[in-house]
Image (spheres, helix red, strand yellow):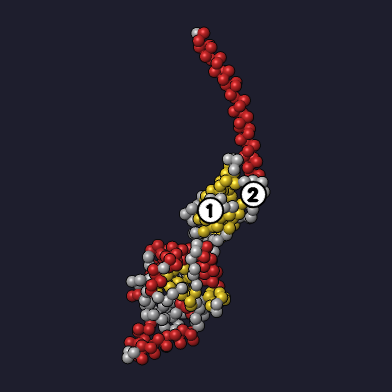
Amino acid sequence: MKRKIISVILVLNIILILTPQAFYNTIAQTENNTQSAQKVRFSNNINRVREGRRINLRVIANARIRSIRWTTSNSRNVRIISRTTSQRVTVRGVRGNTRATIRAIVTFNDRTMHTISRTIRVNDLFYEQEMPLLVNRDNPIPRNWNADLVSIGDGHQLNRRAARAWRAMRNAAREEGISLWIISAYRNNARQTRNFNNRVSQHRANGRSAEEAFAMTAVWIAVPGTSEHETGLAIDLNSLNQSFERTREFRWLQRNAARFGFIMRYPRNKTRITGINYEPWHYRYVGSNHARRINRRRIVLEQYIENRN
C-alpha cells in the first residue's frame, strides 16, 4: 500500500514539473505562428483569376524563407507552376469556370512554418457557349459570317477571340521553352482563290486534266468559300511539312492546345471525313470545352457536330 502511495506521489510530482514547461511551449508555438502569419500574405487581389494569372506572396524585409510549397484543392481543373522557393506561381491548366483553394506552406529559416490559403474563382477565358462553326467542302462559310478580325502582328489577322487564345497559348509555350509562330492566319476569299488556282495550274502544267488538277488541289487547299482560314479561326504553325509531327513544338501542342481552345483540325486517317489530307500544322479555334471533348473522343469537328445535333 505504501509503495502505491509513493508511486502516485512521484507521478504527481513529475506532472507538476512538466506541465508548466508544456504550457510555456504551447504559448511559444502560438507566438511563433502569430509572428509567422505577420511575415507573409498574398500581395494581390486573387478572388478571381484566369489562365496565366500570377499569384504573389508578400514577405516582410527581415523574414528569411527556407521553402514554399504550393498546392491547390482542385488539381484536376487548376494547376499551379512554381519553384520550391518561389514567392510567385502561375495559374495553368484551367478547365472550365471553377473554384479552387490555393495554399502556400511557408517554412522560414528559423524552422517556423505558416500556411496561407485563399479560395478563388477561376475563369476559363476560352470557354465557348455556342457550338463551333463547321466549314468544309459540304458546308461553305455563311454569307452573314463576321470574322471580327484583329491584328496579331507580322501582317496576320485573326478573329478577336481566337487571337486572344493564340496569344495566351504562344506565351504559355514560351514559358516552357517552346517557340510557336504563325505562317498563315486569316485569308480573304481573293487570296484563297489565288492560292487554289495557282496549285491547279501547277498540276495542269504537269499534264493533269482539269478534273484531276482540281481534285488533287482540293485535298490540300480548301476550295474558296470553304476554307477555315477565311473565317479567321484557323492558323498554320511553324512548318507546312508533315515532318512537323516529329518536333517538340508539335508534342507540346498535342498536350496543351485544347486548353486554349485549339484542335488539330486535320488529323491522320481522317481525310475521308474532313476532305483534307493530314496537316499537323493546321489548328482551329473552337473553344476549350469543345476542344477537350473532341480530343478525348479522338474525333474530328464533323463527327462532333453530327453527334451533338
Checking the image for residue 83, the label placed there is: 1
Write down the quadrant of residue 135 in the picture: bottom left
The foreground one among 109 and 31 is: 109
Q: Relative to residue 100, is residue 37 depicted above or below?
A: above
Write down the quadrant of residue 50 in the picture: bottom right
Residue at the spot x=58%, y=40% of the render?
111
Question: Residue 37: where, in percent of width, then height?
Answer: 63, 43
Question: Residue 295: where, in percent of width, then height?
Answer: 41, 64
Checking the image for residue 301, the label placed there is: none
Helix, strand or loop under label 2: strand
208 displayed left or right of 250: left
Residue at the spot x=49%, y=81% of the render?
187
Answer whether labels 1 and 2 touch (C-beta < 8 Å): no
Q: Dot 2: few (<14), some (14–19), or many (≥20) neighbours within 10 Å? A: some
Residue at the spot x=55%, y=61% of the render?
52
Q: Is residue 305 visible?
A: no
Residue positioned most to the right:
61
User: What kind of residue is marked 1?
Assistant: Arg
Q: Mark 2 sits on what residue? A: 59
The foreground one among 102 and 114 is: 114
Helix, strand or loop under label 1: loop
Question: Residue 30: where, in percent of width, then height?
Answer: 62, 36
Q: Relative to residue 12, is residue 247 depicted above or below?
A: below
Answer with mark 1 or mark 2, whichever residue precedes in sequence. Answer: 2
User: What kind of residue is marked 2?
Assistant: Val
**Spatial distance from mark 1 to mark 2, Cα to Cα?**
16 Å
Question: Residue 96: where, in percent of width, then height?
Answer: 50, 60
Residue at the spot x=53%, y=53% of the render?
83
201 displayed left or right of 112: left
Q: Relative to residue 270, is residue 75 depicted above or below?
A: above
